[in-house]
Structure formats: structure tokens, C-alpha cells
Amino acid sequence: MKTKKSENVNINFEEQFKKLEEIAEMLDNGEAPFDEQLKSFEEGISLIKELREYLDKAELKVIDISKSINNSDDQEKLQDDEIDLQ
């Protein structure tokens, strides 16, 4: 039997977020049986954790890219300074 986490890994961020929205809407309605609401709540918490992890990784990637761009800009400035000195 697959766990919820392994099932959720196979769908992309947008699909996970959409599923989370559907769960939130279902819980807001309050029409589902309590056991189903509890199960959906647990699934929602799992999705929140996975989405947060994904966003944290994306943020780190953006920071790394920004740093590499800044480093290359700094290198270009140093090269420009060297050219001006000659």
C-alpha cells in the first residue's frame, strides 16, 4: 500500500495546490461525514508540508541563481576596472 506522501510526489505543485484548495473547500462546507473530514484534514496537512518543502527548495534555488548572477556581475566589474586601469 502506498503512503499519501509517495502518491503526492507524483503530482506537480499546481495539482497539489488545487487538491489542497478542494480539501479546504470541502472542510469549509462541513457536509461530509466526520471521519471523511478528519481523513481529508490529515491529507491537507501532508500537502501543506510538501508544498512548503517545494517552495523552500525553490526559494533556495532562486537565491543561488541570484548569487551566481551577482558574482558574475562582480567579475565583470572587476574586469572593467582592470581595463580602465590599463
Image (cartoon, grey):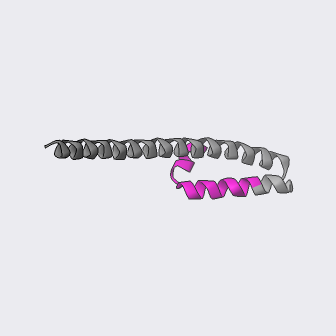
Looking at the image, residue 34 sits to the left or right of residue 81; the answer is right
| Most common secondary structure along the magenta stretch | helix
Can residue 5 be seen?
yes
Tell me residue 85's x, y (percent): 17, 42
Q: Residue at x 52, y 48 (%)?
A: 9
Looking at the image, residue 42 sits to the left or right of residue 74; the answer is right
Q: Going by the picture, which residue comes out furthest to the front?
A: 85
Tell me residue 14's x, y (percent): 57, 58
Q: Residue at x 77, y 57 (%)?
A: 25
Task: Tell me where the magenta segment starts and ends, as one range.
Answer: 1-24
Tell me residue 8's x, y (percent): 56, 49
The C terminus, quarter of image: top left
Q: Residue at x 32, y 41 (%)?
A: 71
Looking at the image, residue 2 sits to the left or right of residue 86; the answer is right
Tell me residue 75's x, y (percent): 26, 42
Can residue 1 be seen?
no
Q: Is residue 65 magenta?
A: no
Count of marks, rendered view: 0
Q: Going by the picture, which residue comes out furthest to the left?
A: 86
Q: Residue at x 25, y 41 (%)?
A: 78
Q: Is residue 18 magenta?
A: yes
